[in-house]
Image (cartoon, rainbow, N blue to C red):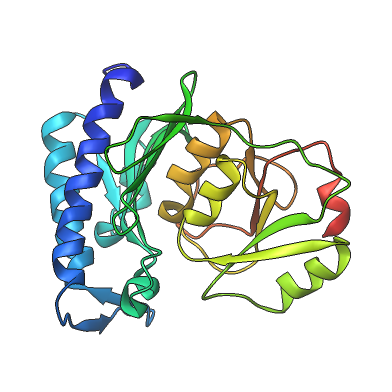
Amino acid sequence: MMAYSELMPAVVDISMEAGGKILDIYRTNFDVRKKDDQSPLTEADMAAHDTIIGRLGELTPAIPVLSEESAEVPFETRSQWQTYWLVDPMDGTREFVKRNGEFTVNIALIEDGQPTMGVIYAPVLAATYAGARGLGSWKQVDDGGKEAIMVRQLPFQDALMVVGSRSHRGDSLNEFLQKVGDYQLISMGSSLKSCLIAEGKADIYPRFGPTSEWDTAAAQAIVEAAGGRLVTMDMQPMRYNTKESLLNPHFMVIADMSRDWAALL
């Protein structure tokens, strides 16, 4: 396999190409269908999926791809994968339907159950977030230069900056917020919530609602390369492709691990 430094530019290009296909449809009167789980599906999801699958197949033909839109691979098969691409062609379809711009293309490389490289592209914002083990993380907006990003150390004298889901806030988050003391809540859609942690603009993103592995993998790679953590509620790193179900346990994205976050659960 190519080094992360060689793979990264190509994967960024792939994410931007997929994002362009999404924007083409975003500007039209698109139709919305329902999946079996009643989550929304648009032609933009499938256009991005087809683009990413095709381009990754050209880039790394020996590495399998698991996408949200082609997730029917039996565990018996994918459990043999030591290395694979994990893709959410459009994370935040609900935000796409609402036309608030808070949706992303997520592409992650998984090795031995851990995300080692990730790219997140937000088409409407023209913002790219990327990170890889040993390379750090960076952000780029439009055609501007790459800016290295890092999580921030918790300023205990200030209000805690908490990120919450725009579409999935529930009682568990409210209960968590009652325990944290002084805080400010930022509501946002898609994996952009984790990107705020990675770039030092927020302290914690607790997620108590349902997510799938493709929702978190790219974000975890970027956050961890920026110095943060994405952990389950027992403070262990999220791992991938370890079971039949592709649903995640509840988790937290944390900038500074020096606080006893488990005490707030």
253 sits to left or right of 218: right
Q: Is residue 61 visible?
A: no
Q: Quadrant of residue 109?
A: top left
Q: Nearer the viewer, residue 197 or 84?
A: 197
Residue visible at 11% across and 44% down in the picture: 54
Q: Nearer the viewer, residue 3 or 139?
A: 139
Residue 24 visible at all: yes
Q: How many marks?
A: 0
x, y percent for residue 197: 60, 46
Where is 72 relative to 25, above or below?
above
Instruction: Please determine whether, in this image, residue 43 is positioned above or below residue 223.
Output: below
Residue at 85% in and 58% down = 264
Q: At 14% across and 54% down in the image, what residue appears?
A: 50
Task: Pick the residue in front: 20 or 159.
Answer: 159
Q: Which image quarter is the C terminus in?
A: bottom right
Q: Position of residue 233 (x, y in %)?
A: 72, 53
Position in image of residue 12 (x %, y %)? 27, 37
Q: Considering depth in this image, is 29 or 52 the residue closer to the camera? A: 29
Q: Is residue 124 left or right of residue 115?
A: left
Q: Quadrant of the N terminus?
A: top left
6 lies above or below 177: above
Q: Is residue 65 left or right of residue 139?
A: left
At horizontal 37% and vertical 62% (from top left) the residue drawn is 103
Task: Give the quarter of the image for residue 180.
Answer: bottom right
